[in-house]
Amino acid sequence: MQHALVTGGSRGIGAAICRKLVADGFAVTFSYCTHRDAAAAIAAETGAQAVQADVGIRADCERLFDAAGPVDVLINNAGIAQQKMFQDITETDWRHIFSVDVDGVFRCCQLALPHMLHEKCGCIINISSIWGQVGGSCEVHYSAAKAAVIGLTKALAKELGPSGIRVNCVAPGVIDTEMNVQHGPEVLAELAEETPLGRLGTPEDIAAVVSFLASPGAGFLTGQVLGANGGFTG
C-alpha cells in the first residue's frame, strides 16, 4: 500500500484530499497546526494518522516525517492567507506568509526526497492558487508566495524527472472554504458570477484533481500547473 502525506489536512481542501486518497486505497498521514478537534474528527472518520506540526518550523516538519515514515506521495496543501493593502503589509506579515506557504513546501519536499530518490519513483503535488497565476488585489504577499510555489514546482520537476519522481501543481480558483469566508457573501457571489461555470469550487473538486495527479493515469505528467478554477482564467 502506498503512503500519502497531506499537510494541512484537518479542514477544507486538505480534509477533502485525505478522504479521497483514503478512498483511493492510500495509507494517509496528515498534519494539522491548531485545529486539534477537526483533525481528530478526520482521523476518526478516515483512519488516517493525524500529526500536529507547523510547516513553518523546520523541527516540526522533521517530526512530522519521523511520525509518517516513508512517503510515496506528498501533497503540500498547508497554507495561510491574509487580506491587506500592500502599504500596510509588515515585514512580519510577509515573512509569516512565506514561512508557511513557500518555506513549508521547500522543507517537506526535501524531507520526502530521500525515500523517493532511493525508490526511483514518487509523486509531489503542490497546492498553489489562481492568485499565484494572475495576482490578487489586497493579497500581494499571498499571491507572491503562491507564484513562488509554481516556480518551485516547475524547476523541481525538471531536476527530479530523471529519477522517476513527478512534481505537479494544482492552482485552485475560488473555493468554498473557511479561508474564503473572509471575503464576505457579496464578494463571493460576485466571484461565482465571474466564474464561467457559475459557481464556486468545492474542496471535493480539488481533491479529485489531486487524486488524478497521484494516480498512474497521470504517469506522463510532470511540471504542470492544473488550473482548477471553473474557467475563471485560462
Image (cartoon, rainbow, N blue to C red):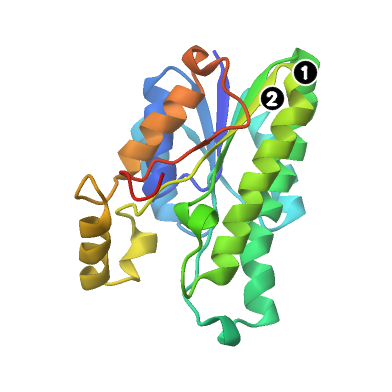
* Residue 40 visible somewhere in the drawing: no
Instruction: Work out how far the residue at label 2 is from the one at label 1, CA to CA, in angstroms.
Output: 17 Å
Relative to 13, is 65 above or below? above
Relative to 168, is 105 above or below? below
| 141, 41: nearer the viewer | 141
Query: How many labels sit on residues?
Result: 2
- Which residue is at 43% across, 17% downward? 25
- Which residue is at 36% across, 22% downward? 23
Left or right of 109? Residue 84 is left
Q: Which mark is residue 16?
A: none
Which quadrant holds the C terminus? top left
Image coords of residue 60 (percent x, y): 70, 51
Image coords of residue 84 (percent x, y): 50, 79
Which quadrant holds the N terminus? top right
Left or right of 222? Residue 11 is left
Image coords of residue 178 (percent x, y): 34, 60
* Residue 69 visible somewhere in the drawing: yes
Residue designated by label 2 = 70
Judged from the image, the secondary structure of the residue bearing numbered disc 2 is loop
| 114, 198: nearer the viewer | 198
- Which residue is at 71% across, 54% downward? 103
- Kindly identify the amino acid type of the residue bearing the numbered disc 2: Pro
Residue designated by label 1 = 163
Relative to 214, is 149 above or below? below
Tell me which corner region of the image, top left, top right, bottom left or bottom right, holds residue 121: top right
